[in-house]
Amino acid sequence: NAGVTQTPKFQVLKTGQSMTLQCAQDMNHEYMSWYRQDPGMGLRLIHYSVGAGITDQGEVPNGYNVSRSTTEDFPLRLLSAAPSQTSVYFCASRRTTYGYTFGSGTRLTVV
Amino acid sequence: DAKTTQPPSMDCAEGRAANLPCNHSTISGNEYVYWYRQIHSQGPQYIIHGLKNNETNEMASLIITEDRKSSTLILPHATLRDTAVYYCIVIPLKTSYDKVIFGPGTSLSVIP
């Protein structure tokens, strides 16, 4: 198993650009989530999903969209990048009774 | 808001046991206690979890009080590589609502 795979690992965007952060898991996990972590800060939940076709907002959803068309994939879309979205983004997945497995993160800089 | 509270920081001498407390006084009957740690800027790493019994694995031990309102993560012989931020969170057994919120955690410094 590859676990949770995030791509790209690094990205620089210009203000106003859009992009999609990819997240894929091969463990058949039902639940998936996106977190962001600003420098020196804790993890903040952006969006989460409890299964294919079901998503919901977390603590800081503004400026981000998600979809879950398959169990394996949970992409995060930045609609119009802003410098405030400079952060490290972590995707995580889990199944019932188990905790989250995290990806290695995408380090995004918006200039 | 996070359902748990932890001290912001702790120090531990290398080779000694590190005991990290967590308060989860509003925990529900179907919620597990999970512990994660995050070393530098890596993705959080799972350590251990439990429902109401004490648990032990190769990394740590988890002691949950009888009323389940608090728990303690024990690293039996702390090493410098255990320096990290430790998160205590509660996660329900199965739910259509999986809004798992991390608190700020405890920053553990293992001192030579």
Image (cartoon, coloured by chain):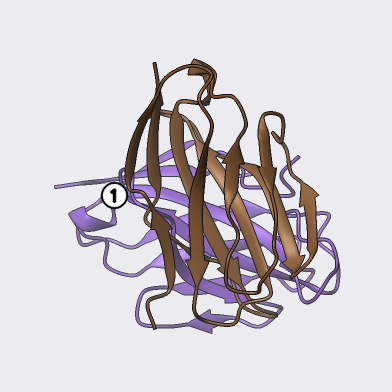
Chain colours: A brown, B purple
Q: Is residue A92 above or below residue A94?
A: above
In the displayed image of the protein, which residue is found farthest to the left? B112
Q: Amino acid at mark 1?
A: Thr
Q: Is residue B7 visible?
A: no
- Residue at x-position 46% and y-position 75%: B61
Q: Is residue B71 above or below residue A10?
A: below
Q: Residue B103 location in percent, x, y?
A: 61, 42
Q: Nearer the viewer, residue B105 or A11?
A: A11
Q: Quadrant of the N terminus of chain B?
A: top right
| Residue name at image x 60 percent, y 72 percent | A94
Question: Alpha-carbon neighbours of circle 1 within 10 Å: few (<14), some, or many (≥20)?
Answer: some
Question: How many numbered marks have been drawn onto this rendered protein structure?
Answer: 1
| Left or right, residue A56 beside residue A106 | right
Q: Residue at x 67, y 29 (%)?
A: A63
Marked residue chain, label 1:
B
Give whichever of A38, B102 is nearer the camera. A38
The residue sitting at 86% across, 67% down in the picture is B96
Image location of residue A88, percent across then percent down: 43, 38
Residue on which disc 1 sits? B83
Q: Position of residue A51 (x, y in %)?
A: 75, 70
User: Can you give x and y, in whole percent of width and height, for residue A27 in the image?
Assistant: 52, 81
Residue B73 appears in the picture as rendered: yes
Q: With respect to residue A109, does B7 lie above or below?
A: below
Q: Determine the secondary structure under disc 1.
A: loop
